[in-house]
Amino acid sequence: MVYESSSIAIVVFVLMVAGTVGLSFYLGSRARSSHGYFAAGGSIHWFVNGIAFAGDYLSAASFLGICGMIAFYGFDGFLYSIGYLAGWLVALLVIAEPLKRLGKYTFADALASKFQSDGIRTAAGFSTLVVSLVYLVPQMVGAGVLVKPLLGLAYWQGVVLVGTIVVVIVVTAGMVSTTYVQFLKGGLLVLFSLLITVLVLIRGVDVHPEGARTSPQRVTVDASGQRFIDGVRLGTGDSEQNVAPVGRVVGMADGRTSTGPVGPIAFLQAISASRIELSQTNKSTEDGRPVVEYAPRVVRGDEMMAPGNLPAFQGIRRAELFPKLDFVSLMVALFAGTASLPHILIRYYTVRDQASARKSTIVGIGAIGFFYLLTLYIGFGAMVSGALDPSDSNMAAPLLAKSFSELLFAAVSAIAFTTVLGTVSGLIVAAGGSVAHDFVAGMLGMQLNDTQMIRVAKIASIGVGAIAILAGLAFEGMNVSYLVGWAFAIAASANLPALLMLLFWKGTTKQGIIAGVVVGTIASLLWIAVCPEMFKTMYGLDPNTAWVPFSQPGLVTIPLSFLAIAIVSQATKPSQR
Amino acid sequence: MHTSANQVDEESDEVIQRRQRIGLRLLLFFTLAYAGFIGLCTFAYTWISETRLSGIPLTVACGVGLILLSIAVAMVYGVWNRRAR
């Protein structure tokens, strides 16, 4: 679909970004010490921190990705919502308070606290950098995809724009500005999602008067690179034609044509009883040039409420074990990964004490859980809105907003953009802090004063920002959800076993912790490098020739990390006298 | 183990250990519910997809239920801690 950049969208977008950067400069002038820069002086109120947790966590993958997946594939997108939220209970019930008690600035502080080990600090710093970088990739890819329809910019321009703005935000004020940006963004995201949900319920479900389409839309490219749809030049001008939006109800089981305004349960019942026209994308080549066909596909609503429609989850419906284990492995990683993400863990140091850490996590769970419930209505609302772009599932939520009003589209798109800014800021603060504390001060043993420590972190942030931009460009077109799933798997394999064993097993040794972090990080990276999805998407090889049987590593690499800690701790335990 | 550069709560080891115990029990309870749901989606796909609860497929009902359960468990833990203090 070709998008015209809207002047309202641009004005709202510019105002929002200017407000964010202005807030950073203002708060930056107030944070002078390293405790202020890295941990907001431990002075953030627990409620603000709780909403900021939501801002940190509800990334582009959560908002654009999940709503888009539900709109195109139904219930499978909601499985991500369930997994993402479930992981927060691990954070609340076993990680939050000990982490606050033991650490100061970084996750490595807590891990190294018992043994005062630079080896642990180095290993944890390494895993923090790896996880931050892997998690940054889908955020940058999401930024590039989003800016294209919003501002009419090219993908690479979107990636560079986000990278640059975020580095400016982080370098100006560190954790203080990041926290308030997250607070505003998280609050706005939940409020606007609620507004869209209310509008979806008021609109109800209507059968489209024209019924189902019978012929596909066919996009071709000529020798000069000009694109055509069904023989007419693709575009929004007078003599041009755009891709027609899809996603409409073509019949309801009880013969009704409209439900009128409905409640939350009646809406789901109406979707379940509907027949819905979606689109199936078929790609081929003709005379060596690409042809894309969007064929109408009528599905039953209740079928879309069953798992296994998403290509990545179709293994659930197969009889073989390994495709099923791929799904289980992803859900294990989502459950175990949240409490291991560096940009989430450092947020525990921005509040005053353990009780505040606990209370802010509960507020975060409330806000995030409420948002994920809304994704069900936004996703299914988009599915039957008649406004879906068949070429881009990520645009489902903004286009649903556009079906209500241009101003709502502008606001939702700008919030989605600050969503990317917020999450990327958090990750870069975590990575920069880790370089300053864990590598320069810890591993290299350099004695740095406050000013020097902040300067090192800022230089590292610029470097991480540059790497994130390059990675975002390199991974264009990669499935964002898959990338996020991998980031969770690496975090869960590298960090969670070490944290849990340190807290709950007295036999854990320094060497065991180091082994767990290193084995978890490297094993999950290696697994991903040789998995079927990488063979297919990145290497262009037959996925059946991959070296491992499924693509999500968590089910194997998390236990492997526990095992490494147990074995090495046993082998290195101090002799009893 | 209980020293840090952060402000340290004035709590006894006994309170901390009791909190750890209740936290682990709640986590075990929730983990079983989560694992059960994932297990049903994976290994009883047909049954969970075709069973209805008030006209809504059981998958959606269970999924919404798990999200509400997450919020409820977090609140129970919060209330327990407030009483314990």
Image (cartoon, coloured by chain):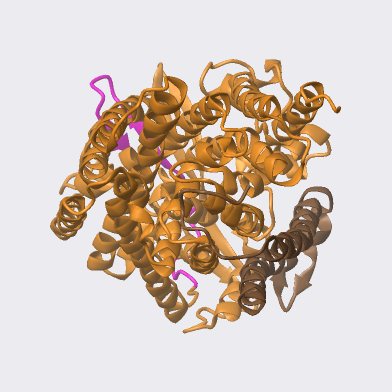
Chain colours: A orange, B brown
* Above-or-below relation of A224 to A500: above
* Above-or-below relation of A143 to A203: above
Can you say which quadrant of the picture contains the N terminus of chain A?
Answer: top left
Q: Is residue A211 magenta?
A: yes
**Number of callouts in the render?**
0
In the rendered image, the residue lying farthest to the front is A577
Residue A146 % position (x, y) = 32, 45
Query: Residue A494's quadrant in the figure?
Result: top right
Residue A325 % position (x, y) = 76, 37
* Residue depicted at 77% across the width and 42% down the height: A505
| Left or right of A444, for residue B63 | right
| Left or right of A510, for residue A41 | left
* Residue depicted at 45% across the width and 47% down the height: A346
Residue A545 % position (x, y) = 69, 15
Q: Specify the principal SS of the magenta part.
A: loop
Question: Is residue A417 visible in the rendered structure shown here?
Answer: no
Q: Nearer the viewer, residue A468 or A426?
A: A426
Q: Is residue A52 magenta?
A: no
* Above-or-below relation of A442 to A539: below
Residue A413 % position (x, y) = 29, 56
Q: Which residues are magenta?
A: A207-232
Query: Residue A156's quadrant in the figure?
Result: top left
Q: Nearer the viewer, residue A269 or A84?
A: A84
* Residue depicted at 27% across the width and 53% down the height: A177
In the rendered image, the residue lying farthest to the right is A577
